[in-house]
Image (tube, rainbow, N blue to C red):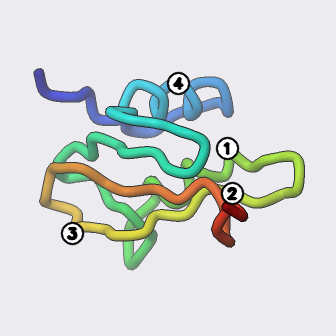
Amino acid sequence: MRPRSPGVLGSCEQTLQALKDMILYEDADVMVLNKPAAFAVQGGSGTTRHIDQMLEVMRDAKGQKPRWCIGSNKETAGCLLIAKRVSPRPR
């Protein structure tokens, strides 16, 4: 099944739902998103909507937002690894 492209979303709730719809795996430390083709991971020239911007709606109580670890180019579909915290959790 091919994920729906997030496109231009109007509200934080819509953005959060679009991200949740892309989640293939999630635990306390990471998320794996199913990134659709033709959707950018980060901003750039002429890019108005991208995953890095969408992750703003997932900031935690400390103000940290999830960060993508390994990206892909805009035209590539596939798994995108997202770290939920900047520093590793103590073990």
Judged left or right of residue 17, residue 39 is left
Q: Quadrant of the N terminus?
A: top left
Q: Earlier in the sequence, mark 1 or mark 2?
A: 1
Residue 47 in percent (x, y) is at 39, 65
Residue 32 is left or right of residue 26, and the answer is left
- Residue 59 location, x and y as percent? 74, 49
Say the numbered circle drawn on residue 58: 1
Q: Which residue is mark 2?
A: 65
Badge 4 crowding class, 10 Å Cα cut-off, few under 14, some 14 to 19, many 20 or more, is: few
| Image: 67 above or below 22 | below
- Give how far apart the Cα atoms at labels 1 and 3 are: 22 Å
Q: Position of residue 68 (x, y in %)?
A: 46, 64
N-terminal label among 1 and 4: 4
User: CB of mark 1 within 8 Å of CB of mark 2?
Assistant: yes
Q: Earlier in the sequence, mark 1 or mark 3?
A: 1
Q: Amino acid at mark 3?
A: Asn
Horizontal and vertical percent for residue 21?
40, 25
Q: Amino acid at mark 1?
A: Met
Q: Quadrant of residue 51?
A: bottom left
For the residues labelled 2 and 3, the Cα–Cα distance comes to 21 Å
Q: Secondary structure at mark 2?
A: loop
Determine which of the numbered discs, if any, sits on residue 73 in the image.
3
Q: CA distance from mark 4 to mark 2?
A: 16 Å
The residue indicated by pointer 4 is 17
